[in-house]
């Protein structure tokens, strides 16, 4: 059975982006980027909402193989090799190594969790909130940047109530602190 992890960079005030057009968080530098590369390489699948998928599809671009740093090229390779399941009612198609699910996301994720071994990473706050309400998330990883955005898209959706158990912390480069939690139940 897969372990589902909701993992995002966040600001000290709890936001994953300032707006749809402006992430507002610092771009990961080599050491932090490598941490995410390693996590992507360990993942059996990425579960993504529409907005997160549209942001990340950048890594499918052939241009990512030229002109980018080695750590970026490495992430692009890991991204392309990892299957993506995209949950959207508005997208008509998705790119390579991706599958579109347009209905019954909870049932689909329950089935995937039972059928899959390893880690599945959730990308996107709205999808994560739906999965959290259905008790499908096994771990929350908050990569806290030492910046304050002052508003935007929160890591935890408004109205979502969770009791969590701390699993540990880790200091990473760029002043980022990784906070890990599991559902308390």
Image (cartoon, grey):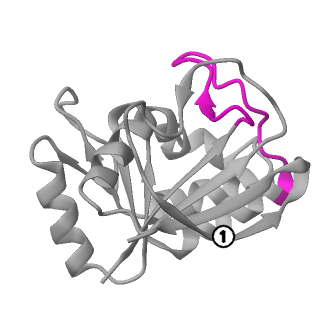
Instruction: Work out which quarter of the rendered image holds the N terminus and state it.
Output: bottom left
* Residue closer to the observer: 158 or 9: 158
* Residue closer to the observer: 68 or 166: 166
Q: Say if residue 85 shows up in the picture.
A: no
From the top left corner, tell me how far across and down residue 8 is, in percent: 58, 48
The quarter holding residue 50 reads top left
Residue at the image point whose x is 56% and y is 71% from the top: 41
Q: Is residue 166 above or below residue 49?
A: below
Q: Which residues are magenta?
A: 11-31
Q: Is residue 93 above or below residue 40?
A: above
Q: Left or right of 13: which side holds 183?
A: left
**Residue density around tag 1, few if under 14, some if 14–19, many if 20 or more, within 10 Å:** few
From the top left corner, tell me how far across and down residue 136 is, in percent: 30, 63
From the top left corner, tell me how far across and down residue 53 is, in percent: 41, 39
* Residue closer to the observer: 111 or 58: 111
Residue at the image point whose x is 17% and y is 54% from the top: 106
Is residue 24 on the magenta stretch?
yes
Residue at the image point whose x is 64% and y is 35% from the top: 14
Is residue 16 on the magenta stretch?
yes
Task: Write down the residue under mark 1.
Answer: 38
The prevailing secondary structure element of the residues shown in magenta is: loop
Q: Left or right of 7: which side holds 1?
A: left
């Amino acid at each position: 059975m897969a372990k589902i992890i909701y993992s995002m960079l966040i600001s000290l005030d709890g936001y994953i982006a300032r707006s749809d057009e402006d992430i507002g968080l610092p771009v990961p530098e080599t050491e932090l980027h490598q941490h995410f590369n390693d996590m992507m390489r360990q993942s059996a699948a990425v579960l993504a909402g529409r907005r997160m998928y549209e942001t990340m599809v950048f890594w499918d671009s052939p241009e990512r193989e030229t002109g980018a740093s080695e750590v970026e090229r490495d992430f692009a390779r890991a991204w392309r090799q990892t299957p993506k399941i995209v949950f959207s009612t508005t997208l008509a198609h998705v790119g390579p190594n991706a599958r579109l699910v347009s209905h019954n996301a909870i049932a689909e994720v329950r089935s995937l969790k039972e059928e899959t071994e390893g880690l599945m990473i959730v990308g996107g706050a709205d999808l994560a909130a739906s999965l959290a309400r259905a008790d499908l998330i096994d771990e929350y990883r908050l990569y806290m940047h030492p910046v304050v955005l002052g508003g935007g898209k929160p890591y935890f959706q408004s109205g979502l109530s969770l009791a969590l158990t701390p699993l540990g912390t880790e200091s990473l480069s760029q002043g980022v602190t990784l906070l890990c939690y599991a559902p308390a139940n």
